[in-house]
Every structure is written in structure tokens, then in C-alpha cells.
Amino acid sequence: MRQALAERLLAKVMCWAPEDVARELPVLQALADHKYDEYQQFFPGIRFIESLALWLSQFGAADERRIAYDFIKKKLVFCSSAEMNHLVSIAYPDHVRPLLLRRAARDAGIDERLVSKIAAHAAFKIRQRQCLFLGLSDGARIDIFRRSNSPDLTHEQILPTYEVSPPRVNELLNELSTSVSTLLDSEAPEEMRKFRTIVLLDDFSGSGLSYLRASDGHSFKGKIGKFHRSLTAGDGAAALLVDIKQLEIIVVLYMATDKARSHLETLSKKVWEPLGVKNSIMVIHQLSDSICLHPDDGSAMGALIETYYDRDIEDQHTEIGGTDVKYGFAGCGLPLVLSHNTPNDSLPLLWADSKKMRALFPRVSRHRKET
């Protein structure tokens, strides 16, 4: 009954004739059933078609509603939970493991093309065990990552957070020493009792700024900046995990934009290379800039963005992006929705709830706006 009412409301809002209803509703229902209804931040009892009808009703003119509707139908990118879990599951075997195989091949003097021989060699097995995986947020989906990579990786080398306590550091090093000794069938030498590779995992980045950004002087902020400080502090617990001269840092993002990757690659060099630390950014699914909206592209949607923008959604956290958020944080302009939440890098017309704006996919923010 509620679904039928939502469909009638949508038809009324869009001023559809019966033939329009017959053409459009099956497509919308298929999209809702396949993906959009799984969005986790809808209010209780609300589903996509009802949310769409209420969202479209905020636009005053019929032409505006048509433009907004066409944008959702043709341009929206929605990443489902199953799709994100797939990216998590292939991150190690398809991206990180091949790099470790190449490193082990070099160490053992084996031709890189002889993959099976390298994988069976003790040099690779030790390299793999000397790899520590740390989640940068809940979005890293560490539970899925662990299950997808057992038995190649042990639970002891996969942690949900990059903030590691001193007692946990001792446990990790003892477990590593025991595992390497087992692989060698003899006591592990001192230089093999520390991690050689640290992989930082997370789900999405639109701008890269929340992970790494330059601060005053020679310091860096963001999650990676914070991890860098913990790793390089002489008295820090995390510093005991590695020999910085032998370390390699890999940042793995399951999904990211061209903009985020470029930003992180540029700043990562400035962070790690002065220490002689190898570093790389791996993006499992990269979003092209071609899907983004920009103020100068002259799109019809741009006029709606200008007309219905509410500056009240800005706060001290959005200021970090260096611009207003008409086109999302840092002007990313993404038409993206993730099944668990909508990133603030996306267009606010999709996610912002305020006195002047109604969200299609309501967003839950990590930060509470200060008044």
C-alpha cells in the first residue's frame, strides 16, 4: 500500500501521463529493487521511490524536477554493499600480493615470471607474513578482508585500526617472530622480526584531504599524517614495529577518484621519501573525473545547485576543503552514493538536509556542527 502511494505521489510530482507512468515506473522499481532500497540511512519505513518523490517536490518548477529526475536516472553512481565487498575481496590477491611476489623474486633472485616458484619459496612466505594490514576507519571492512584472505594471511597481521597500543605491539612482534621461525624451521634472525610492509586500508576517498594534507611547517595532518607521526616518533609504540630503513608503505583504497589518487601520490612522496621509505597508492576501482560536475561545465544541474544551495550546511570541517560545498567537499562534484552512507564529496543536493534542502539519500556525518 505504501509503495503504491509513493508511486502515485511521484507521478503527481512529475505531472506524468499514464503512458509516462508505464514507461518510467518499471525502470525505477528495478533500480530500487536491485540497489537503491538497500541504502542504510533512509528513515524507517522510507524506500527509494518515496524518498525520490519527496526530494523532487522541493524543486519549484516542472523543468527543474525533470532535470533533477533525469540526473538521478542517468548520472547517479550507486555502489552497493556487494560491489564494495567484491573490491575488498580482490584488494590483496589482485593488487598487494603481486607486489609482494615481485619483491620476493628480487630477494631470492628468481625470474618474476615464475609466479608459482616464487609463491612456494620461503622468501615470499616470509615477506607475506612480514606484511601488516591496518584499517584507517570502519570503512576498511576488516571482517570481510580477513575472511577473503584466509589462510594466506593470519588474523594476527590484520588489525581494524592504525592506532596500536604498546601491549599489542609486543604481541604482534612475538607472533611475527614465532611465524617466521616456523617458516625457516629455525630461530628467526633479528632483522626478520619486524614488519617490512604496512598496508593501510580504507573504502573511499574523493579528495584525499582527510587522509593527508600539508600543515604549517613540515608537518602533515590527516589519518596518514597521524600514522606517520606515530611511526617516526622515537618513543612511539608503533615505531617498534618496523625498521624504518627497510619499510614500505602501501595505501589501499577500495574506491577513489582521480583527484584523490593524484593528491595522495604527490603528498606521500613528500611524507615518506625523506625517510627512504618506499610508498605507493593502490586504488582498486578508480572513478574518472569525467563523472564529476564542475561549476564551469554549463550543465542544467548546475543551475539547480546554485538555486537550492544552503550555506548553513557549511562548518569548520567543510572549510578544510578550501571552498564552499555547492559541489561537495573540496569541490569534488561527485554523483556518488555508497550503500552505507553518502560521502560529503558528493553533490549536497543528494545528501544535505537543512531548512532549504531535502536529501534524497540522507547522510550521517562523523562531525556534529558546532553552533
Image (cartoon, rainbow, N blue to C red):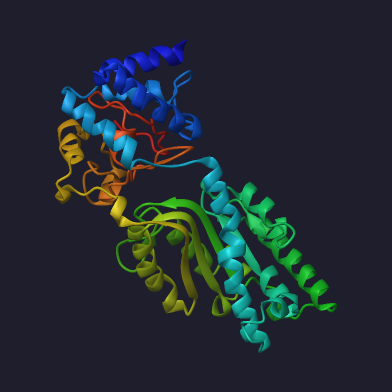
Which quadrant holds the C terminus? top left
Is residue 254 at least partly visible in the picture? yes
The reply, left or right, for residue 135 in relation to residue 70 is right
**Residue 303 at x, y = what percent?**
15, 37
Instruction: Give the vertical position of 97 relative to 19 (above or below).
Output: below
Q: Residue, x 33% and y 35% (percent of image)?
A: 73
Q: Residue furthest bottom?
A: 109
The reply, left or right, for residue 350 in relation to residue 365 is left
**Residue 155 at x, y = what percent?**
71, 55
Q: Nearer the viewer, residue 138 or 72?
A: 72
Q: Nearer the viewer, residue 95 or 352?
A: 95
Is residue 54 at least partly visible in the picture? no
Q: Residue, x 47% and y 10% (percent of image)?
A: 1
The reply, left or right, for residue 115 in relation to residue 320 is right
What is the quadrant of residue 125 in the picture?
A: bottom right
Q: Nearer the viewer, residue 299 or 229?
A: 299
Q: Residue, x 40% and y 36% (percent of image)?
A: 365
Q: Residue furthest front?
A: 19
Q: Residue furthest right?
A: 185
**Residue 266 at x, y = what percent?**
35, 69
Instruction: Give the vertical position of 89 relative to 178 (above or below).
Output: above
Q: Residue, x 35% and y 14% (percent of image)?
A: 8
